Image: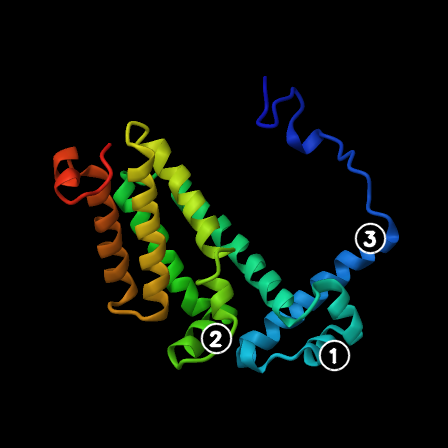
Amino acid sequence: MTYPAGGDVPPSETVDDRTPDPPRVAWRKEMRRSILAAAYTLASEAGWDSVSLSAVAERADVSRPSVYKAFGNRAGLGHALAVQETQQLLLEVAEILRSPEPDVGTALRSAILFVLTEAERNPLLKAVVSASRQGSDSLLPYLTARPDPVFQASHHMLRAWLGTHYPHLATERLELAADTVVRMTISHLVLPGWDPVTAASKLSRIATALLTRTDQEHRDDGLPEA
């Protein structure tokens, strides 16, 4: 019998032969995790605008120079925090897209709805989005406008997923659909026009329409053909 890892031994019986980190490296990784956890808590409580490196250092029980050494500056810490949250969010979105939904539209609707509702459940995302709607919070650019981490990572994942369901479509058509879904979902997070259920339904229908329109319809609108 062959197991998922590609060998003949069940995962539970494999031996982890990874070499442990040297004590100093392990300590630095733990310190970095502590700093990120402290920054997450402080930003969730009062928004990123209110977070100082001194407060982060105090909450993490490390020195202020240690925070600078680990992240460079406040912008570096904000970027690392955004990357951490994005990676976790995309892991959960990927799980939803892999679920046995009956069609692409239904799967997209479930994924978009998850993102929109997670913004209300996740303390950090809620704090950032709430502050941005009031015209503040300097962490928002790391989650939206910057070329990374959210847009590129989300776009890449969705583009690859759509390609498995529409292998016959041109890359440009898949790129357009992925770009539309990601941009409109982020836009709706910041400036909601509908409730999450309605928004997820409308955005998934838009994406499905882009993917299923005929080549002539796309030519008429100057859009990529299949």
Earlier in the chain: of badge 1 and badge 3, it is 3
What residue type is disc 1 on? Glu
Mark 1 and mark 3: Cα distance apart in space: 22 Å
- Residue drawn at x 45%, y 80% as measured from the top left: 136
Answer left or right for 99 relative to 170: right
Give the percent coordinates (x, y) of residue 205: 21, 49
Tag of residue 152: none
Q: Where residue 72 sits in the image (x, y, percent)?
A: 71, 66
Q: Residue furthest top?
A: 1
The reply to whether dot 1 and dot 3 touch (C-beta < 8 Å) is no
Is disc 1 placed on a helix, strand or loop?
A: helix
Q: Is residue 74 visible?
A: yes
Q: Is residue 83 left or right of residue 172?
A: right
Query: What element does badge 3 sit on?
Result: helix
Distance from disc 1 to disc 2, alpha carbons, whole Å, reads: 21 Å
Provide residue 152's location: percent of width, then percent of height. Answer: 46, 50
Q: Read off the residue under disc 2.
A: 127
Element marked by disc 2 = helix
Left or right: 76 in relation to 123: right
Q: Position of residue 46 (x, y in %)?
A: 54, 81
The answer to whether any part of residue 62 appears in the image is no
Is residue 66 depicted above or below 93 in this figure?
below
Which residue is denoted by mark 1 in the rendering? 58
Q: Amino acid at mark 2?
A: Ala
Instruction: Tell me which colouring the rendered structure shows.
Output: rainbow
Alpha-carbon neighbours of circle 1 within 10 Å: few (<14), some, or many (≥20)? some
N-terminal label among 1 and 2:
1
In the picture, measured across the screen, residue 18 lies left or right of residue 116, that is right
